[in-house]
Amino acid sequence: MHLQTTSPWSMRQCCCDQPSDHPCDDLKPKKKKKEIKTLNIILLKFIALLLNLHLVNRDMALIPAVTRLTSSVIRILGCNPSPMTLQGTNTYLLGSGRRRILVDTGDEDVPQYIEHLGDVLQQEKASIDTILLTHWHHDHVGGVKSIVGTKLADKDCRVFKFGRTDAQDVCPEIPAHIKLHPLAHNQEFATEGASVRVVHTPGHTTDHVVLTMSEGTLFSGDCILGEGTAVFEDLFEYMKSLDKILAIKPQRIFPGHGNVIEEPIGKIEYYISHRNQREQQILQFFVQRPSDRWQAMDVVREVYKETPENLWPAAAYNVNHHLSKLAKEGKLRMSKSEDEEFYVYQPTSAL
């Protein structure tokens, strides 16, 4: 069970009564086909997350604005609730001395979060020496500009992030004058009372990392959530990352969204088995129809019969990831026709 401090700021609830801007507010018509395609992918990711949360218990425990989880870890909620961020982005202040490490920074332009962070630092008589970003998404990097160069951070405060491999490694929310220092797999950071090791875990994004502490705590970013299952860009890499985290054998997980995971092994195994079960259902669809070519929505109509039809586009988004993974493994063969992708069963050799 995690500990809650009784100091005045720790029990204050997140004061933002209204959710931050809806993640689809920026989905406005664009002239360029490439931009429209990108926005459609964003929309599908959003719907896919709703699908993943479809069966989640909505009576989830309320997360206070600030919670002392251990003697060296304080969680500050990002005050940016939405369907994409659940109750908001969890950020974590590490250490027990004057110079602290901050893991993730929430969304940009959220004064409630910055106020809570400032109150914590004042109470702790501390400042931020290092910022570690788990990945490039706006709800994790957006607060950087409101922290670096202010009284909240040391003058020599440095910001670290793993590099992206799928696109230019630029975060629009971070001004150009703030330098992003590269993270490396197995890189270690230490401050008084806390030390963490970086583990590269691509799949949710190509630059995603988790952080481990020697006492068994793991900061999972968006790779594993406190509620529901995570959205991913590359299922093949994501499954390998889940295996990597399982091998670490964390004793507790502090996720990027949702409550503390006190029984992490079971949670990780569920994530893996859930995806493997779906994958087997999808592969069986092709095994039973070996002579024809199929698209994701064809699979959805058969495999996702129990899912409300209005969520089928989101299911097709997830199925496409499974199809891509199966193709990488040589179990399916992908062909294109007029910009549409089709998949055919690829029998394995019986040598």
Image: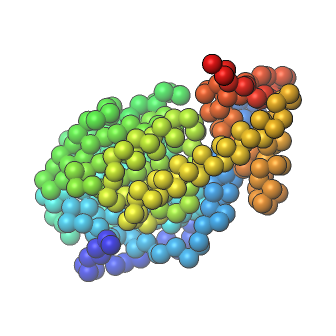
Count of labels shown? 0
Q: Which x, y percent locates residue 8?
A: 28, 80
Q: Which x, y percent locates residue 301?
A: 83, 49
Q: Nearer the viewer, residue 98 or 188?
A: 188
The image quadrant that residue 324 belongs to is top right
Q: Which x, y percent locates residue 257?
A: 47, 59
Residue visible at 52% across and 56% down in the picture: 270
Q: Which x, y percent locates residue 33?
A: 75, 30
Q: Can residue 348 be seen in this view?
A: yes
Asked if residue 10 is positioned above or below residue 19 in the image, the reply reads: below
Among all residues in the image, which is located at the extreme front? 351
Looking at the rendered image, the quarter that the C terminus falls into is top right
Q: Can residue 29 be seen in this view?
A: no
Q: Nearer the viewer, residue 23 or 266?
A: 266
With 220 as the anchor, is 54 left or right in this view?
Answer: right
With 34 as the anchor, is 174 left or right in this view?
Answer: left
Residue visible at 52% across and 73% down in the picture: 60
Looking at the rendered image, the quarter that the N terminus falls into is bottom left
Residue visible at 37% across and 65% down in the picture: 262
Residue visible at 60% across and 67% down in the picture: 56
Q: Which of 21 and 189 is in front in this view?
A: 189
Q: Which of 237 and 97 is in front in this view?
A: 237
Colour setting: rainbow
With 120 as the anchor, is 18 left or right in this view?
Answer: right
